[in-house]
Amino acid sequence: MRYQVKALASGVMQDLVVEAGNEQDLREQLRQKGMQLIAARPADRMRLPALSKKGFQLSLFTQELIALLDAGLTLIEAVETLKEKAEADEHGAVLGRMIESLYEGLPLSRVMGKMPEHFPPLYVATVGSAEKTGHLADALKRYHHYETRLQGVRKKIVSALVYPLVIITIGGGIMLFLLFYVIPKFSQIYASMRNLPFAAQLMLWWGELVHKQGLILFAGIIGSISVAVMLLRSPAVKGRLKEMFWRLPKIAQYQRLFALTRFYRTVGLLLSGGLSIIAAMELAAQLLPPGMKLALTQAITDIRTGQSLSATLPRYALTTPVSERLLRVGEQSGELATMFERAAQFCDEELDRAIEMFTRLFEPILMLVIGVLIGTIVFLLYMPIFELAGNMQ
């Protein structure tokens, strides 16, 4: 398999095309040549130009910067190396602005803080805390691990919703086919009959309606679906639906759990970078829903007065039973950062179980509903025939 490779050799970034069986084989080949792999992708992979990413790619930038810093390059050398191989797009422009600001003597955190559209506050805070300790690569690794874990949770939630959406789409297509093609054709069997059963009269009425106004009906259905999709994409409607969705009792519980996962993991990341507990929680507060954010603000006020963290957060419903015990242990042992991360892992596991339960229950129920709807249409098609055959005996 051919790979398009970015590799570092003697402090110089090179673009190569390498034949390798897999990524491990690729790394070994580069290592034998004295090169360090920075990034790789299959060279023959089809990519549509319209779908290619042209904006600033934070995740790619982070991974490449970590590799260059670990290879011994200084910060400016690393960013310049990335700029040399960057395309003349937004990604390259951001790197160019970073280099100019770094040569002006500004710290990296301030440089990134000037570009909030590309670097989120948490990223800037992580870099800022690393500048105090001098371990930028380690801090970026922690942030990358943090983002990877959160992306993993998001992907699990999205993948759990994909299958139901596919089933709804296929089931809706089958129902439209039955309503606008099968039933009109089938209803002609009853056109010349008298004293028809109710089901046959219903089929005949629908068939005649489709023959006369079928195009308008079909256009109306497609138009309604299009309008519904457009409304769902509007921020106001989307926000309202989200608000209604999160108010459902069980769903609200899982939203709280997901928010706590992000909160614990963010605070753990910032504590590992050297921030104080108050500063870490104030920065992580922006990741919480409004109600939990208000509760955290009140909790921070109490903690400032000298109250313990493990006693304050439970009072404002910002813990789970497991995380409460872990935070208590973390305070006693001085390993709060580690315990926050463990608390996030326990929340992850509970979310995984909830997603698995959702897919096990919701998918069969959805299949049953669609099956009943399609089965009802088929039943209405054949029921008149059975009634007429029974009357002839």
Image (spheres, grey):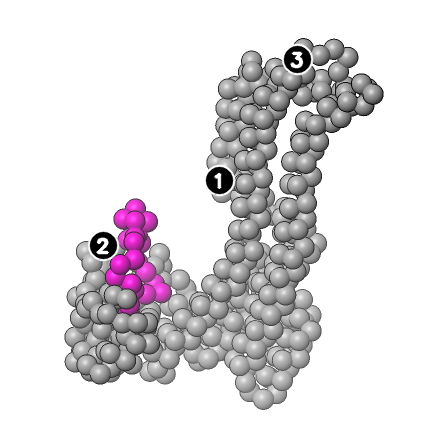
Distance of label 1 from label 2 (alpha carbons): 29 Å
> At 69% across and 70% down in the image, what residue appears?
315
Mark identifier at residue 190: none
101 sits to left or right of 294: left
Stretch in magenta: 38-60
Kind of residue indicated by mark 1: Ser
- Tell me whether the residue at label 3 lies in contact with that at label 1, contact meaning CB atoms closer than 8 angstroms: no
104 vs 363, nearest the viewer: 363
Q: Is residue 163 visible?
A: yes
Task: Label 2: state its secondary structure.
Answer: loop
- What residue would you read off at disc 3? 191
Q: Quadrant of residue 346?
A: bottom right
Say which element carries label 3. loop
Say whether disc 1 or disc 2 marks the residue closer to the N-terminus. 2
Left or right, 352 with respect to 194, comes to left
Number of marks drawn: 3
**Above or below: residue 171 compared with residue 106:** above
Residue drawn at the location 66% of the way across and 51% of the way down:
364
Camera-near label (3 vs 1) is 3
Residue that carries the numbered disc 1 in the rendered image: 234
How busy is the neighbourhood of tag 2: few (under 14 within 10 Å), some, or many (20 plus)? few
